[in-house]
Image (cartoon, helix red, strand yellow):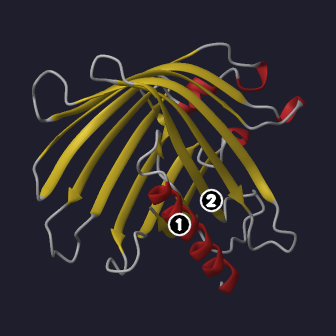
Amino acid sequence: MKKTILIFVVFSTFLYNYSFSYENTPFSLYKSNYFVTAGESDSDEGDTQSKGQFSVKYKIMEPWQSQIYFGYTGTFWWQIYEKSKPVMEHNYAADLFYKRDSFLRYDSFDFYQMGIAHISNGEDGEKSRGINYVYGQTQVSYGDDINVGGGITVRNYFGLPNTNIDYEEYCGIFDFTFFAKFNEEGSIIEDGKILYQYTPGGTFNTDRGKHILTLEFKLLREYFNTLLYIRYENGYGINGLIDYDRKSSAIMIGLKI
């Protein structure tokens, strides 16, 4: 547990410094940046004990009151409580995307985004996994002190390798997201957020896909920009591309910025 706490502190401090170092440059944080642990497992299935993600984007240009970005996201799954502490899986994701904020002259429309993405685990042979897709994403929300909203992402896969040719059937083409943000200044849950994501398998196969539920809120807000992060995952693909066709679940806790 002491080693886990040390990793939490080092990881969150690095991300905190990174986010402020690049505040006035084309670089910025992209998707969720976090490190979480599920605790020691007695399972022989290779379930995740710890998971981390680092994600940044680079603004290439700003045409027509919009932005074109290159994004990179690295995710790893780590058996931190095993004697040899093996890393189960790395996934490397790169995408090129166009994004526009607050469109259609309605304040409740937060943004829409369109892009092309590639994700790989960097392995060879039978362990090789990779996906390519084009996607569209949009989000709407309402409220100031309590901001409630939802979003949808639609993917179209192409060029899937034989080692994961049926990826779509397990991990789906839609993501449905619902969230609530708490922005009331001085509140005990200021900067808090609850998010639920549902991804049906295939087109709408409820027997596959996954559910993700997260809770985050700020710790020691006068001193750190770090959030306490609780993450629940259930379904297919939660242990990375290598196990996209195996169902699993985990409750993890850690730090996020």
Relative to 94, say whether 44 is above or below: below
Horizontally, residue 177 falls left or right of residue 3, namely: left
Whether residue 89 appears in this view of the structure is: yes
Q: Is mark 1 on a helix, strand or loop?
A: strand
Question: Looking at the image, which is closer to me, 113 or 165?
Answer: 113
Residue 166 screen position, x and y as percent: 65, 23
Residue 79 screen position, x and y as percent: 75, 64
Horizontally, residue 32 falls left or right of residue 105, namely: right
Whether residue 244 appears in this view of the structure is: no
- Disc 2 residue crowd, few under 14, some 14–19, many 20+, Cα 10 Å: many
Relative to 202, say whether 10 is above or below: below
Horizontally, residue 141 falls left or right of residue 156, namely: left
Determine which of the numbered discs, if any, sits on residue 51 in the image.
2
- Disc 1 residue crowd, few under 14, some 14–19, many 20+, Cα 10 Å: many
Type of amino acid under label 2: Lys
Residue 192 screen position, x and y as percent: 28, 65
Type of amino acid under label 1: Met
Q: Residue at x 38, y 80 (%)?
A: 223
Determine which of the numbered discs, if any, sits on residue 183 in the image.
none
Relative to 248, say whether 207 is above or below: above
Q: Which of marks 1 and 2 is in front?
A: 2
The C terminus sits in image quarter:
bottom left
Q: Distance between the residues labelled 1 and 2?
A: 8 Å
Give the mark nearest the N terminus, 1 or 2. Answer: 2
Horizontally, residue 123 falls left or right of residue 27, namely: right
Q: Tell me where residue 94 sits by quadrant.
A: top right
Q: Please report contact status of discs 1 and 2: CB closer than 8 Å, yes or no.
A: yes
Which residue is label 1 attached to?
Answer: 252
Q: Is mark 2 on a helix, strand or loop?
A: strand
The N terminus sits in image quarter:
bottom right
Q: Which residue is drawn at 66% across and 86% down?
A: 2
